[in-house]
Image (cartoon, helix red, strand yellow):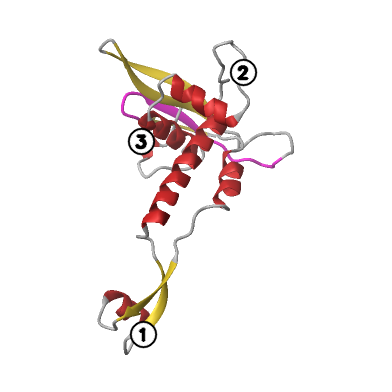
Amino acid sequence: MKKSKEANVDTIVEFEEISPMEFQVGNNVFESKGYSIVKVTHDGVIKKLKIPIKSTGVTELIDRFTKNAPTPPVTTTLVNPLDPIGKQMGLKEKKWVKMLDFADPVYIKDSDNFQSMLGIKVVLQGVDLPIKGKDGNVIIEEDARIEALKSIGITSDQFTQIANDINYLTRWKESKEDDFLPL
């Protein structure tokens, strides 16, 4: 067992390297929990909300949801062998080819909506605390949970921050300093 410290922007995070000898059903060795630190400002005072998050069920949710991801339309395009794409294809003469149109406005809109909804679903799955209504009862229904978060003032930047932190609970980031969200 090896212990290390990693420097973060405003904290030093200690982590432990573990070499498992076996995997046993019921032992949640892969379960990851941490916090998403979200900036808010109240009356000119900057505060950090420390929101508990978990990774449990997020990968499965993403796998299920992305099966219905929008796909760009296929267009037929005349490709010149001197164009970069023609060179890449090794063309010797102009040729009509079928290509995915990632610039299609309908596809872009559908893709943006899909990504937004995926982020919302990740947050709903990964926030490790109940979302309650005005009456104090836990909200179960997904659309009502989304509306509840919006009604308490969560911004799109905060949603994105929380979704990214949930995803990074089990994924290495580019920067080693940002890899760890401590409990």
Q: Which residues are magenta?
A: 8-23
Residue 95 circle label: 1
Q: Which residue is mark 2?
A: 138
In front: label 3 or label 2: 2
Identify the residue at horizontal 38%, vertical 32% (top origin). 156
In the rendered image, the quadrant that contains the N terminus is top right
From the viewer's perspective, is residue 9 above or below residue 164? above
Instruction: Tell me which label, 3 or 2, sits earlier in the chain.
Output: 2
Q: Position of residue 137 (x, y in %)?
A: 62, 14
Q: Nearer the viewer, residue 158 or 168?
A: 158
Q: CA distance from mark 1 to mark 2?
A: 60 Å
Residue 14 is drawn in which quadrant? top left
Q: Tell me which label, 3 or 1, sits earlier in the chain.
A: 1
**Residue labelled with disc 3:** 177
Residue at 45%, 64% in the rendered image? 73
Foreground mark, 3 or 1, reads 1
Vertical placement of residue 132 versus 84, above or below? above
